[in-house]
Structure formats: structure tokens, C-alpha cells
Amino acid sequence: EQGFPTAVPHESLQDRDWHPLRKGEPLWRDHEGNTVPYDGSRGDVITPIFINEGGYYYASSGRGIGVAEKTVVDVPKACDSF
């Protein structure tokens, strides 16, 4: 409401950037103190990053947390000398 977040990252995530978060594990803490679990909307496992970074609380980002998704990329060998 009025530009403020309706929930903040759950305290169990603090200092755990780059650690996997699985569906059903705590993701948010709402203003009433309730734990809101990760719902699996971006896959069964996500990787939270930049947890509680101030810039993520602006209305333009709206989360208070970033999420990285694992991607596997095949990179061709540049040359045979390595």
C-alpha cells in the first residue's frame, strides 16, 4: 500500500544469496508476521540473489529480492591449443 511492500524477504533467507530455494520453503514474511512460502511459480527450485538490497524495494522492482535461473549453455571450443 502507498508504495510500501506488502511483505519482506523471510529472515531465513538473509545472508543466503545463491543458495537454492525450493517450492514450499519460506520466501516472504507479511506485515502480520505470517510466513509465505515459495509457490513454485518459476520452477521447483530458484536461486535468490541480492536479498534485502535496498534498491529492490523501489516500486519499479517491487520485490526486495532478485532471482537467478540456472541455464546450461554449450560453448564451442575456441581452438585446440588449450
Image (cartoon, rainbow, N blue to C red):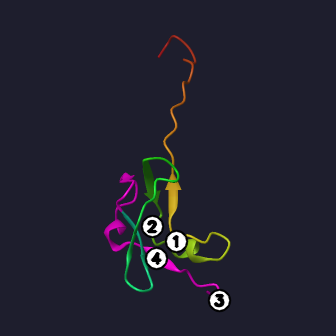
Q: Indicate the secondary structure of the residue bearing disc 1.
A: loop
- Residue type indicated by callout 2: Ile
Locate residue 19 relative to residue 42 in the image: left or right. left
Q: Residues within 10 Å of mark 1 (few under 14, many from 20)?
A: many
Which image quarter holds the N terminus?
Answer: bottom right
Q: Which residue was labeled with disc 2?
A: 51
| Residue 8 belongs to magenta span | yes
Q: Which residue was labeled with disc 3?
A: 2
- The answer to whether mark 1 and mark 3 are in CB contact below 8 A is no
Residue drawn 55% across and 80% down? 5
Hey, which quadrant is residue 75 in on the image?
top right
- Residue 8's label in the rendered image is 4
Hey, which quadrant is residue 32 in on the image?
bottom left
Q: Indicate the secondary structure of the residue bearing disc 2.
A: loop
Q: Give the range drawn in magenta.
A: 1-25
Above or below, comparing residue 67 to residue 32 in the picture = above
Q: Which residue was labeled with disc 1?
A: 64
- The answer to whether mark 1 and mark 4 are in CB contact below 8 A is yes
Of all residues shown, which one is farthest toward the right? 60
- Residue 7's label in the rendered image is none
Task: Tell us which disc is closer to us: 4 or 2.
Answer: 4
Q: Indicate the secondary structure of the residue bearing disc 3.
A: loop
- The answer to whether mark 2 and mark 1 are in CB contact below 8 A is yes
Question: Which is more N-terminal, label 1 or label 2?
Answer: 2
- Residue type indicated by callout 4: Val
Q: Indicate the secondary structure of the residue bearing disc 4.
A: strand
x and y percent of residue 60 in the render? Answer: 68, 72
Question: Which is more N-terminal, label 3 or label 1?
Answer: 3
x and y percent of residue 82 in the render? Answer: 47, 17
